[in-house]
Image (cartoon, rainbow, N blue to C red):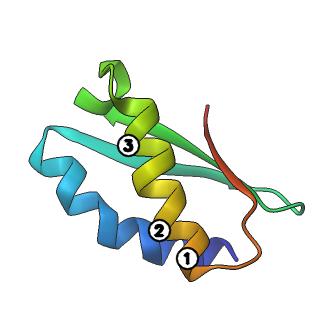
Amino acid sequence: MKAKVEKVLERIRPALQADGGDVELVEVTKDGIVKVRLRGACAGCPMSQMTLKMGIERMIKQEIPGVKEVIAV
């Protein structure tokens, strides 16, 4: 599952990098929790939770049915 998540993040990454940010995959747990670290401009952005839930989490869940949640660590 980790490779599938990384593939989805590769498609999301250019949009984040265009705004000076990035996302790093930290861990995918056995129970379907994806842990990511927002970097660069995304780390301190007030809209980062919206980006995480409405952007990153939505796309990952769409592509990978076993994912329950995406959280920032």
Q: Residues within 10 Å of mark 2 (few under 14, many from 20)?
A: some
Q: Report the front residue among 27 and 63.
A: 63
What residue is shown with label 1? Answer: 62
Residue 1 badge = none
In space, the residues marked 3 and 1 are separated at their CA atoms by 15 Å
In space, the residues marked 2 and 3 are separated at their CA atoms by 11 Å
Q: Are marks 2 and 3 in contact (CB under 8 Å)?
A: no
As shown in the figure, which amino acid type bears the numbered disc 2? Met
Relative to 17, say whether 20 is above or below.
above
Q: Which residue does the image show at 23% across and 49% down from the upper left?
A: 16
For the N terminus, the quadrant is bottom right
Element type at marker 3?
A: helix
Q: Which residue does the image show at 64% across and 79% down from the upper left?
A: 64
Q: Which residue does the image show at 19% across and 61% down from the upper left?
A: 14
For the C terminus, the quadrant is top right
What residue is shown with label 2? Answer: 59
14 relative position to 5: left or right: left
Q: Are marks 1 and 2 in contact (CB under 8 Å)?
A: yes
Element type at marker 1?
A: helix
What residue is shown with label 3? Answer: 51
